[in-house]
Image (spheres, helix red, strand yellow):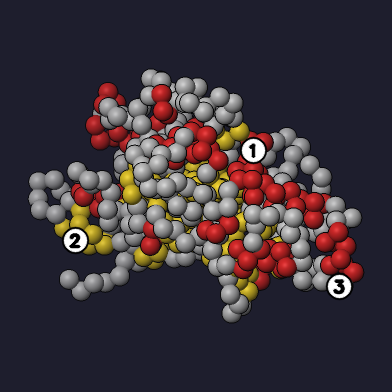
Amino acid sequence: MAECTLVKVDPKSDFSVANLPFGIYSVGDGTPQVGVAIGDQVLDMSALADAGLFKHIAALDGAVFSKPYLNDYMALGRPVWQEVRRALLDFLTNTDNSVRRRLSDNGTLGSGVLVPMASVEMHLPARIGDYTDFYASREHATNVGAMFRGKDNALMPNWTHLPVGYHGRASSVVVSGTPLHRPNGQRRPDPTTAPVFGPSVRLDYELEMGFFVGPGNDLGTPLTMRQAEDSIFGVVLLNDWSARDIQAWEYVPLGPFLGKNFGTTVSPWVVTMEALEPFRVAQPVQDPQPLPYLCDATAADGKGLPSAGYDIQLEVHLQAGGDGDFHLLTKSNLKHMYWSLRQQLMHHAVSGCNMRPGDLCGTGTISGPTEDSFGSMLELCWSGKRVIPLGESGLTRKFIEDGDVVRLTGFCQTPGGHRVGFGECTGQILPAKSLGF
């Protein structure tokens, strides 16, 4: 791929010319609008549309880039997304690009279309109508099942046959950097006595990724596997904060409730599937083979579908008390995910459920085969049976304490190639609010 000639991009930057992630930003008291990250700058997509960079794309109304959300752009579909990407790449790499020359001639090539990233505030990328969280990592499901049901009964009977998921709370999805209060709720620390009410004492992170739905489908009309593939706009980092003690008491028989709904954090920049294309890998072997509708090879339109896994390196760091060094806790990879993104989306819609532009789906905790790749503190401390050292600091944790900051990062890179990163997904846990009862 050609190098960016418009701005200098550090080779270590998450936002190389091979990336071009979309987000919603504002400057000062300005209205939030669509931007694309390049190096340490943000491209003003509305200004580029006004300059005529996308006028050749008949299906695109440039007004979508002045909206404070990406939903309308997500709804346009892959052919438009690809055309916009090609136009951006030519603008950034081709000094003879006609729009670029015209902006240069009238003196607006820099400040007219570029905003320093250090000066912007980032917002949620979309108005999230619905949020679903899956449980798609075999290693994570096995670890958690082994803790509470024993190794021989770790996986529930349905787990290897379908992507297990539950409907989360869209209203409490927040953008990176938003602090969250420790949740209050019922828990039952002693199984021989009545439950108690108060702040969670086993607060945890879950290393996940989330994908945003593009065009979606009509109510009553399932997606095919190929349509599911083409309906995923892009991916973000996602921290599915979890109050383990509240969850353990409440989740039977309908699944998580207060143990999850107090907050979910996502990174602000949505890395598109086009940017992730070079990093496809085979997903783990599925045994037993899924039912035909979930199997790429036997799906009616499955012929020619590319590999469904992605080689995305992921890390979680924790800063104790919100001060000092960040300490590495987890080092995992999306390629370990048993159920692929398109399988998750296809299964979600197979009942006729209508998926809409801007809907968010979480992958579930991404744990790998080794202890250092476990994607939650629940696994790292094995439900409180051991402590987690914070580097060489002498500090330890079992679960998150008040003031702690958790940071998720992720990136892809081929040897000698451009880095495609996700930025940060960061959140701090504040003390629980006193409710007076």
Tell me the residue at 52%/49% (across/down). 214
The image quarter containing residue 274 is top right
Q: Is residue 80 left or right of residue 243?
A: right
Measuring from the top left, give residue 419's x and y in whole percent: 69, 45
Residue at the limit of the structure toward the bottom, as seen here: 29
Residue highlighted by disc 3: 107
Pick the front one: 218 or 33:
218
- Three-letter residue code for mark 2: Phe
Query: Between 156 and 96, which is closer to the camera in this rendering?
Result: 96
Q: Quadrant of the N terminus?
A: top right
Q: Which residue is mark 1?
A: 277
Q: Is residue 41 above or below residue 17?
A: below
Three-letter residue code for mark 1: Glu
Q: Secondary structure at mark 1?
A: helix
Which residue sits at x=28%, y=49%? 256
Question: CA separation, marks 3 and 1?
Answer: 36 Å
The residue under label 2 is 197
User: SS class of the residue under badge 2?
Assistant: strand
Q: Nearer the viewer, mark 2 or mark 1?
A: 1
Image x and y of residue 15, in percent: 68, 52
Q: Quadrant of the C terminus?
A: bottom left
Residue 220, percent from left and from top: 36, 43
Q: Identify the residue shown where x is 52% and y is 58%.
A: 71
